[in-house]
Amino acid sequence: MQRVESTKKNLLNNSRLSASGNLGAAYFRKIRSQYLLTNDLGHHCLLRPKELQRYLSGQVEEGGLLHKRLKKSGFFNSAADDSAGQWQKKHAYLWQRGPGLHIVVVTLRCNHKCLYCQASPANMRDRSTDMTLETAAKVVERIFATPNPTISIEFQGGEPLANWPAVRFIIERALELNHQFRKRLQIGLVSNLSLMDPEKLEFLLEKRVSFCTSLDGPEDLHNRNRVYTGGSSYSEAARWWRVIMRKTARRKYRIDGLTTVTRFSLSRARDIVNTYKALGARGVYLRPLSPLGLARNTWGAIGYSPNEFAEFYRSALDYILELNLNKSGGIFVEQTAKMFLTKILLREDPNQLDVRSPCGAGIGQMAYNFDGAVFTCDEGRMLSRMGDDSFRIGSVAAGSYAEAVGHPAVKAMAVASCLDNQPQCSLCAYKPYCGVCPIYNYVVQADIFGNMPSNARCRTYMGILDYLFEKLQRKRCRQVFQRWVTQDKRGRPYKQG
């Protein structure tokens, strides 16, 4: 009964309008005193209750201001509009040719013992989880088998720098092969930076590798979340961050960080933002916990509810907006918000595979384990570490690229992450901007389709989107958001702080 009542309550605030007469198909949701109206083209309008009533009853005066607003955004059917073309442009990723993101795990070894680690790391002395150069060569060959003209290779772990020979080999081999294939090749390193040294850094800079590290906030908070057996995790990350910032000044691609929010972070929103500002970062990525790996076992100590995360996120976003509205503060971005705002304001795909429909598992990305096993995505690879190989789609040692992308698990993931197949999602006003993770659903709810009314990830994203649309009603906040989503298009390098 509780589930039924929850669903009824959701439908009252969040529904789909079927096309009838001159009305276009649309969705609506109550945002404070107004109603948010959206459609599959990604357009949105905020209406007062009486305006929504006039729209639903077909009493919008043709030629009036409300009619012009709604017609411009595709909320009325018209033989002259280009809805199909707009939809195709918004969903251009559906026509991409093969996976573009290739996550390579060269080792499971790590010298950190992070409380929330999703990868379940191996001991630094256990070299049995290091990728061999023979396997590395096969991984690169498999990556270049994709017909996608854009390839992004991303090293993850474990700590990738613990197996530096494999990292170096893959970079060199990929650049060598690209002389033949002529793809738009990007290479990124996700590292805790503790094993960095000048020689490695110079090589990575020379090869134009981008950097990403975990930075959970000020030193005491970071070290509490990310325990480093060799000393202060924060000190090492911050030291190399500053070096990389200095050596990549005026470049567009420099170093970025992400914050995994634990229970210990909830009261530290300003401290976290200030830490990134002090390091000259261009923004912060506030990432909620995921119940994979060690986090599943430590959830009772470090986890929280979607409502608790929403309160933290609102506090952080308010402060970030305050900094942006201060003329001397410059542009400072929250990346989760930017991801959604790119869809909302530009109606473009920000290349974030976890908020696509269908998700990018197996069709937008693949993950390669140290032993050459291939998975639909990095979450599938992490689940394998937990003893479940449901999302393993092959190996670079046997089979082919075609067999991997045609694997039943890839097809199942695509079907399960298509929002039109999700009863609650198909009615949601946030359908044009959101996406589901079948593996999250599988781990938490034992079903790749999930049960959205009780799905914590759904409630977390819904809380973020609710607040973004609240802020979009304020002119100055909307101007800040507009700058966030257009700064990359201007090609302006980020200033060093």
Image (cartoon, rainbow, N blue to C red):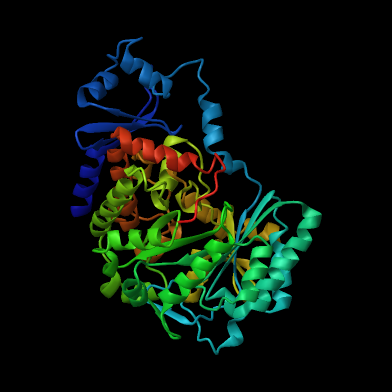
Left or right: 476 in relation to 365 = left
Q: Is residue 257 left or right of residue 66?
A: right
Residue 16 seen in render:
no
Q: Is residue 478 visible?
A: yes
Please identify the quadrant where the C terminus is shown: bottom left
Which of the 4 quarters of the picture holds residue 171? bottom right
Residue 277 as seen in the image, left or right of residue 362: left
Q: Nearer the viewer, residue 265 or 297?
A: 265
- Residue sitting farthest toward the front: 328
Q: Quadrant of residue 25?
A: top left
Q: Residue furthest right?
A: 180
- Number of marks in the rendered image: 0
The picture places residue 221, in percent across and down from the top left corner, at 32, 72
In terms of depth relative to the viewer, which is nearer, 220 or 373?
220
Q: In x, y percent, where is residue 151?
A: 65, 54
Q: Position of residue 104 (x, y in %)?
A: 60, 67
Q: Indicate whether 194 appears above or below 146.
A: below
Quarter-of-image position of residue 107: bottom right
Residue at (26% x, 73% y) in the render: 300
354 in relation to 423, above or below: below
Q: At x 56% / y 28%, what residue is drawn?
A: 85
Q: Is residue 93 left or right of residue 295?
A: right
Q: Is residue 194 above or below residue 139?
A: below
Nearer to us in this view, 317 or 87: 317
Residue at 37 percent of width and 35 percent of height:
479
Q: Position of residue 67 (x, y in %)?
A: 34, 16
Q: Does residue 466 lie above or below 208 as drawn?
A: above
